[in-house]
Amino acid sequence: MTTDHLSTWDDARRLADELEVQIHLASMDARDRWRELEPRLEKLEEAIAHSGEHVGDAIVQEVKDVRDALRALRDQVYTHARSDYVHGW
């Protein structure tokens, strides 16, 4: 994997770890989206582990797609949490 690809994967993995901690406070919709993303993340980890340095374009694109979906979910969770805090639980 190139340095750029590793950076993208590291970003996706960091977002996933961050979300895993926050997801229990999230809305049902956010939890459902997390459950959809988790298997994709696991599948990507396996694909990356098996491919070594020669990651194909499809894997690179999937990493980017998952990272973007994780970012969107993180933003939704944070927005929801801030709204709850401001308006009271």
Image (cartoon, helix red, strand yellow):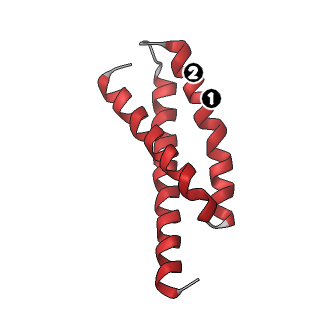
Q: Is residue 62 above or below residue 75?
A: above
Amino acid type at image mark 1: Lys
Residue 54: x percent and y percent? 44, 12
Report the Cα–Cα distance between label 2 and label 1: 6 Å
Where residue 75 sits: x, y (%)?
46, 61
- Amino acid type at circle 2 is Ala
Secondary element at tag 2? helix
Element carrying mark 1: helix
> Mark 2: few, some, or many residues within 10 Å (few <14, many ≥20)?
some
Q: Is residue 45 above or below residue 41?
A: above
Give how far across and how far down residue 49 sits, in percent.
53, 17
Along the horizontal axis of the image, is 37 left or right of 56?
A: right
**Residue at image coords 55%, 53%:** 21
Please give the name of the residue rendered at 64% of the width and 54% of the height, measured from the top-left corner.
33
Asked if residue 63 is positioned above or below residue 15 in the image, the reply reads above
- Residue that carries the numbered disc 2 in the rendered image: 47
Image-quadrant location for residue 24:
bottom right
Where in the figure is residue 83, as x and y percent of width and height?
Answer: 49, 79
**Circle on res. 33:** none
| Residue with the mark numbered 1 | 43
Q: Residues within 10 Å of mark 1 (few under 14, many from 20)?
A: few
Outermost bottom residue: 87
Q: Quadrant of residue 47?
A: top right
The image quadrant where one finds the C terminus is bottom right
Q: Is the C-beta separation of discs 2 and 1 under 8 Å?
A: yes
Q: Residue at x 48, y 34 (%)?
A: 63
| Quadrant into which the N terminus falls | top left
Q: Is residue 23 left or right of residue 28?
A: left
